[in-house]
Image (cartoon, rainbow, N blue to C red):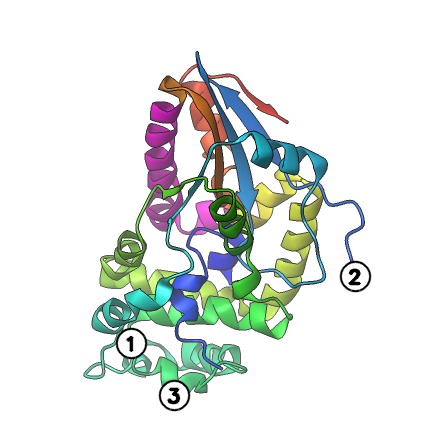
Amino acid sequence: MRLLRRLSIPVIVFCVFAVGALYSAAEPAIWVVKGPHATVYLFGTIHALDQNHPWHSPKIDAAIQQSQALWLEVPDVDDAASMQPLIFQLGIDTAHPLSSKLTPEQMAKLNKAAAGLPGGNGMLEMMKPWLAGMMLSLAPVMRAGYDPNTGVELQLKPEFVKANKPVKGFETLEQQIHYFADMSDKAQLDFLVSELDDADSAVDKFKELVGAWYSGDVAKLDALNNSDFRGKYPDLFQLLVVKRNQNFVTQIQDLLKGDGVTFVAVGVGHLVGKDGVPAMLEKQGYKVARD
């Protein structure tokens, strides 16, 4: 669940395996940064929603209308099925069952957390820790009634495609999978254990996150997404958040050196706090303002 609260990897990447109160004044956070001849809007997304919570606002719609291109974390967020062979290749290890890598206490937590997943803990048993952690991050979202297939990116992309505006990405789905698959054995276990430790409170915290996202409460979003993770797992935080943010910033700076208007939509965990993209851009001398 920690993964989805931080909103780093689009849920659709690992949703391949998951077969089978209305917010009246939504105002998710959006920032604007300008170069000499270019404007970039930064919109923090959430990767799983339900259909009863509209998130468009006049500010967001105006930014979308002005923008000539959309940049997402990955451009083919709606084609994760093409990555299924790679996920199987890098995430399945039948020779070393997951239970052989966990303590009895951790296995008890895993069995409880796996409730509601297709295949339950039997499916997780053949997975490497990184993939099991991804699957466990999805379970509470499904139990809470949120659907990865209605995430913001999957709603935004068709709007730009319909308007004949290009959709580009900072990363590829393959890169995102490798962020996890290439982690050391210890880092993979740390990631899985972080999900297990988070499991009991995951549903309530995700609902709290959604509420903070709708209201644009960036301080709360940083606390829910990053603060605990940054403190308990600093190496993972550097790998999965800070280094990726630095990559985003490098490419956004290139956009700002050009011209035109661009709409950037990435997981909101990448945009809030001292390690967020807006803060990094400000350190580079850009003026970033909430729109």
Q: CA distance from mark 1 to mark 2?
A: 41 Å
In the rendered structure, which disc, 1 or 2, sits on the residue that comes first in sequence? 2
Q: Residue at x 41, y 40 (%)?
A: 166
Q: Which residue is mark 3?
A: 122
Q: Up-down: is 186 above or below 68?
A: below
Give the image location of residue 269, x and y in percent: 51, 44
Nearer to the camera, 181 or 96: 181
Q: How many marks?
A: 3
Circle 3 packing at 10 Å, graded few (<14), some (14-19), many (20+), is few
| Closer to the camera in the image, 106 or 246 | 246
Q: SS at mark 2? A: loop
Q: Residue at x 27, y 83 (%)?
A: 97
Please indicate whether residue 96 sits to the left or right of residue 188 in the image: left
Q: Name the residue nearer the viewer: 207 or 148.
A: 148
On-image quarter of the C terminus: top right
Q: Main secondary structure of the magenta part?
A: helix
- Which region shows up in magenta? 226-255
> Which element type, helix, strand or loop, lies under badge 3?
helix
Q: Which residue is mark 2?
A: 21
Tell whether label 2 touches label 1 (CB within 8 Å).
no
Mark 1 is on which residue type? Lys
Q: CA distance from mark 3 to mark 1?
A: 15 Å
Looking at the rendered structure, the kind of residue marked 2 is: Ala
Of circles 3 and 1, the one toward us is 3
**Does 166 appear in magenta?**
no
Mark 3–mark 2 Cα distance, whole angstroms, equals 35 Å
Amino acid type, residue under disc 3 in the picture: Gly
| Above or below: residue 66 compared with residue 148 | above
Residue at which label 1 appears? 101
